[in-house]
Image (tube, helix red, strand yellow):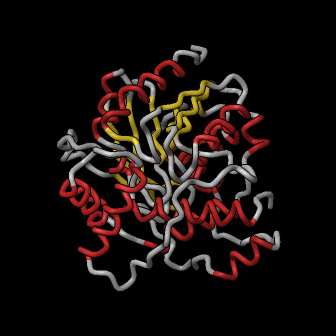
Amino acid sequence: MTHSYKTLRNLVVALSMFCLMASNLVSARPDIYPEAPTYFGPSNGVSIAYQEFGDPANETFLLVMGLGGQLIHWGDEFVNQLVEEGYHVIRYDNRDIGLSEKLYDEGVPGLFTMIKYKLGFSLGAPYKLSDMAADGIGLLDYLGIEKAHVVGVSMGGMIGQVMAAEYPDRILSLGSIMSTSGAEDLPEGPHQVELTDRDGLTREQAIALIANTLKAIYAKEGGLTDEQWLAYAARGYDRSHYDPGFGRQVWAILDSGDRVELLKSLRLPTVVIHGTIDPLLPIEHGQHTAELVQDSMWVELEDMGHYMGDEHFERVVAALMENVARVDK
């Protein structure tokens, strides 16, 4: 293990808050794809729920969501901008979340897990980030897609980093957004969050908790109205809410170690995008990731927290397109 206990605590606090929010991309606009069908494909031993948009004959963008987030949390407007750029887009639920297969027979991490981590023992997680990366590659296999551009947010960025390292012949380019290298002693965010167990909460109480968390990590004034935050939180909660899956995803992150040497090994066009006001993973996490990846592009957004909204989509897509242009055709 290479994380210090301080790093572990900060990561768990930050990522646990992220779980409560249930997503990190939001749009105030009506759904562009309200009737988009959800399909299910076998991948790496689990059933993965996915949606696809645009012409499958075009190059593919594979969108990897963060901890506790669902495929619907890749905002429709963001997806549509990629489609309008001429790409085929796939968004999917990670294992244990959303409509993808739940590992009901597996346990969840507890205090003993944290003690083992502090002592440097293996945590025995039922799966790791490499397994989640294999899920994404398996989905491409199922769909008959040889190569794809991969974009991930937060934990999805970590998974994308692992995909790029372990399957270099399958990944055309990488976009790592509001993510981290997982290196020891990176700073903690300004928010120290008191975690709340959602067991026993009514639907309305759980949705209010998620909405309040969303507003906190937005990290600036403005954004959506209270009613819009509540509606957005309700959409994800009503589609699926499964806290044990979140716990196992945290477990996977902690048991996977840092990605410092992995990032040094990458040899593909990579863009690292991070907000300057991110309250969960401060900008140093993104900067360190960019420093480790050879010839990476670094893009910082001064008005972005641990959240990507309508006002960020155009700039993020532009950065992705600039990175894609560096791919050898």
Quarter of the picture containing the C terminus is top right
Q: Residue at x 39, y 54 (%)?
A: 23
Q: Residue at x 61, y 15 (%)?
A: 328
Q: Judge by depth and name the residue closer to the eye, 254 or 35.
A: 254
The percent coordinates of residue 177 (x first, y second) are: 52, 39
In the displayed structure, would residue 328 be above or below residue 93?
A: above
Q: Quadrant of residue 87?
A: top left
Q: Residue at x 42, y 56 (%)?
A: 69
The percent coordinates of residue 20 (x first, y second) are: 42, 65
Q: Is residue 189 left or right of residue 214?
A: right
The percent coordinates of residue 28 (x first, y second) are: 22, 43
Count the numbered circles shown: 0
Quarter of the picture containing the N terminus is bottom right
The percent coordinates of residue 219 (x first, y second) are: 41, 48
Q: Judge by depth and name the residue closer to the eye, 57 or 263.
A: 263
Q: Judge by depth and name the residue closer to the eye, 275 or 254.
A: 275
